[in-house]
Image (cartoon, rainbow, N blue to C red):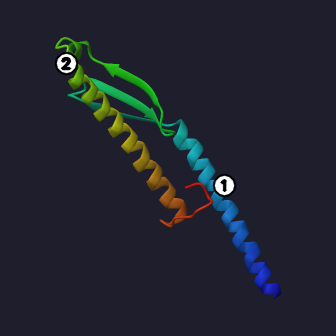
Amino acid sequence: MKGMRGGMAQFIKQANQMQSKINKIKEDLDSREFEASSGGEAVKVIVTGAGSISNLTIQPEVLEDNDVEMLQDLILTAANEALKAAQTTRDKEMEKVTGGMSLPGLGI
């Protein structure tokens, strides 16, 4: 019985260490920025790893056509690509810590 308690204590210690690593990775990724563009760089979007848009740049030439639908599509495309890059990076970094396991309760 004593060995079982020791094993559980070791497991809890390892889980706490993993949680600390995950928290550190989240902090790092939340502060990083990811950029994507569309329309030959007519629209550029920068998002944070936390998933918020921090910058949007639209080249003036895009506005000359007065094509609102095209502009909307360019913005959506660039934003979605930047968010996808952020999520892909987050997934890869977390996989390094968890070995690819899904660990409910650890905030992954």
Residue 60 image offset from top left, x and y in percent: 25, 12
Quadrant showing the C terminus: bottom right
Does the residue at mark 2 contact the one at mark 1 (Cβ under 8 Å)? no
Residue at x 44%, y 55% (from the top left corner): 92
From the viewer's perspective, is residue 89 above or below residue 17?
Answer: above
| Circle 1 Cα neighbour tier, 10 Å, few/some/many (<14 / 14–19 / ≥20) | few
Label placed on residue 3: none
From the viewer's perspective, is residue 5 above or below residue 75?
Answer: below
From the viewer's perspective, is residue 81 above or below residue 38?
Answer: below
Q: Upstream in the sequence, badge 2 or badge 1?
A: 1
Residue at x 27%, y 17% (from the top left corner): 59
**Residue highlighted by disc 1:** 20
Q: Marks 2 and 1: which is nearer the front? A: 2
Give the Cα separation between the discs numbered 2 and 1. Answer: 49 Å
Residue at x 28%, y 26% (from the top left corner): 72
Residue 44 image offset from top left, x and y in percent: 32, 26
**Residue highlighted by disc 2:** 67
Q: Viewed as shown, does residue 23 lie left or right of 69?
A: right
Residue 20 image offset from top left, x and y in percent: 66, 54
From the viewer's perspective, is residue 22 above or below residue 63?
Answer: below
Towards the viewer: 65 or 16: 65
